[in-house]
Image (cartoon, rainbow, N blue to C red):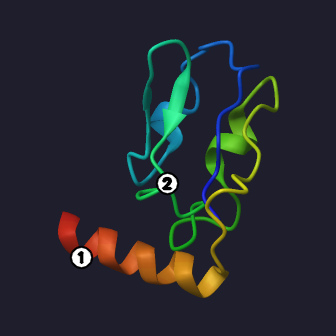
Amino acid sequence: MALLITDECINCDVCEPECPNNAISEGAEIYVIDPALCTECVGHYDEPQCQQVCPVDCIPLDPRHVESKEQLQDKYSRITAVQA
């Protein structure tokens, strides 16, 4: 399942550099997460790094993009193969 940044985002800039897949970018009003690139840090870390650093706890799971750990691992493998 990809993550989602909610309207509670204060644009503090701490999440974007923490994302190992470059899935987080500046949106029109708040930061956004590209679900095609978000693996919840599977393949990189044990926990989503953006959630760990977010001071307002505004990055929940995105119910519109439900994925199993295996699907996230497969996505990680595809992303890192393209980046290599």
Above or below: residue 61 compared with residue 28? below
Percent x, y for residue 5?
65, 34
Q: Position of residue 45 (x, y in %)?
A: 60, 65
Q: Distance from label 2 to label 1 (Cα)?
A: 18 Å
Describe residue 48's horizontal placement relative to residue 32 as left or right.
right
Evaluate if marks 2 and 1 touch, with contact meaning CB atoms under 8 Å apart: no
| Residue 23, placed above or below residue 48 | above
Residue lying at 54% horizontally and 19% vertically, measured from the top left: 13
Q: Secondary structure at mark 2?
A: loop
Quadrant assignment, res 60: top right
Q: Which mark is residue 63?
A: none
Of discs 2 and 1, which sits in the foreground?
2
On the image, numbered disc 2 is attached to which residue?
35
* Mark before the other along the chain sequence, 2 or 1: 2
Q: Quadrant of the N terminus?
A: bottom right
Q: Which residue corresponds to the image point at 58% horizontal and 25% vertical from the top-left?
A: 14
Q: Which mark is residue 81?
A: 1
User: In the image, is residue 59 above or below residue 47?
Assistant: above
Q: Is residue 27 left or right of residue 2?
A: left
Quadrant showing the C terminus: bottom left
| x and y percentages locating residue 69 in the rendered image | 65, 81
